[in-house]
Image (cartoon, rainbow, N blue to C red):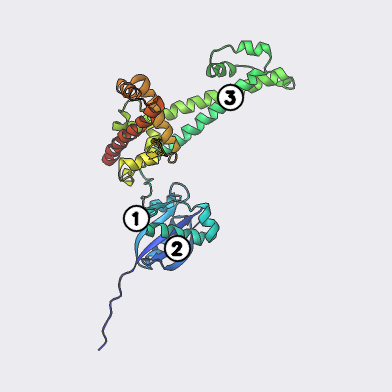
Amino acid sequence: MTTAVDQPIRTITVGVDTHSKVHHAAVLDDCGAMLGERRFTTDVRGYQELLDWAADFGIINAVGVECTGSYGAGLTRHLLAAGVDVVEVNRSHALVRSRSGKSDAIDAEAAARKIMSGECKSPAKDTSGSVEAIRNLHLVRDSAVKSRTAALVQLRDVLVTAPDELRHRLDAKTLQAKAMQAKSLRPDMARLHEPEQAVKYALRDLGRRIFDLTVEINATDKHLTRLATDVAPTLMALPQVGPVSAAQLLVTAGQNIERFPSEAAFARLCGVAPIPVSSGKTSRMRLHRGGNRQANKIIYLIVICRLRYDPRTQAYRDRKRALGHSTADAIRSLKRYVARELYYALKKDLTMA
């Protein structure tokens, strides 16, 4: 009589090194042994082939994906839709690469080992909700603002060397107003070989570019305001938090706010978590200098605006000064407080969404 022996179900961990054209996946068992590695195309067919191939080795515990916000975004959405846990994996340090070499297979294996060791355990951002729509609009606005700023600087530089008649003609107080005057200039196209006509042409085109970018920014602001108000009404109700600030904070947090186990984790991401820098007789704290610098900038601007208009914030600064602290110390403490306030507002809004 033959006795059937039940084979234990194997649990596996998958690591994926992402690129624009192909993804490289590696599979490890629960003991860390390599079971296989393979390349897949970056399309829906390739994503499903990767999932089916990995599932043949056993039950998928988690998939570690590099660059979940760029090259790995499509794969991440596909895996999440299939009910697979996806963990965001940071790229390996340069020192590690110099020791163990650099290849797609090595990077994929390293991604899987980071999950197994617990080095990376944050869930990947969910890019299938309204926050992803806000991110795209915010990206367009940010690009338009940078382009307008560059055009305004160029307009100012051209005016410095322009003929006196033109400089006196564009007599508005601000660069934005000068641009509105410049866009109505009429250069003689048959005399562009003359410096004066070439300057008129340059100023007119810069003025038109600035005007068009301003129209684009204002239109995007209207859409951002509507989306931010719908997605995060609690956040928008906080003092000195406008639609652009709310959009950046939503992009930083992501649709799935549960990625952050605590307010301290959110503060760390925003670069406002205090860390000790004591030595000898000196005992003090400073803020962590890593994290998302755009979110850090928004928190700083919120604090500065509240110091001007919010009586509670002004009273806190005065209390810190009375205790012998500087204004900079008060701002550091206020940034951490604002991060706490923002986290709970985001958690309320995104949990309800």
Residue on which disc 1 sits: 85
N-terminal of the pair, mark 3 or mark 2, is 2
Question: Residue at image x 27%, y 37%?
Answer: 348
**Which is nearer the eye, 202 or 245?**
245
The amino acid beneath tag 1 is Asp
User: Few, some or many C-alpha atoms within 10 Å of disc 2 (few <14, some 14-19, many ≥20)?
Assistant: many
Q: Is residue 262 left or right of residue 107?
A: left
Determine which residue is flagged by label 3. 153
How far apart are labels 2 and 1 at the CA level? 16 Å
Q: 243 above or below 182? A: below
Q: Residue at x 48, y 33 (%)?
A: 142
Find residue 302 and name its label: none
Residue at image location 38% in from the left, 23% down from the top: 305
- Answer whether labels 2 and 1 touch (C-beta < 8 Å): no
Quickly name the residue at label 2: 26
Quote the CA–CA distance across marks 3 and 2: 50 Å
Q: Residue at x 39, y 40 (%)?
A: 275
Q: Earlier in the sequence, mark 1 or mark 3?
A: 1
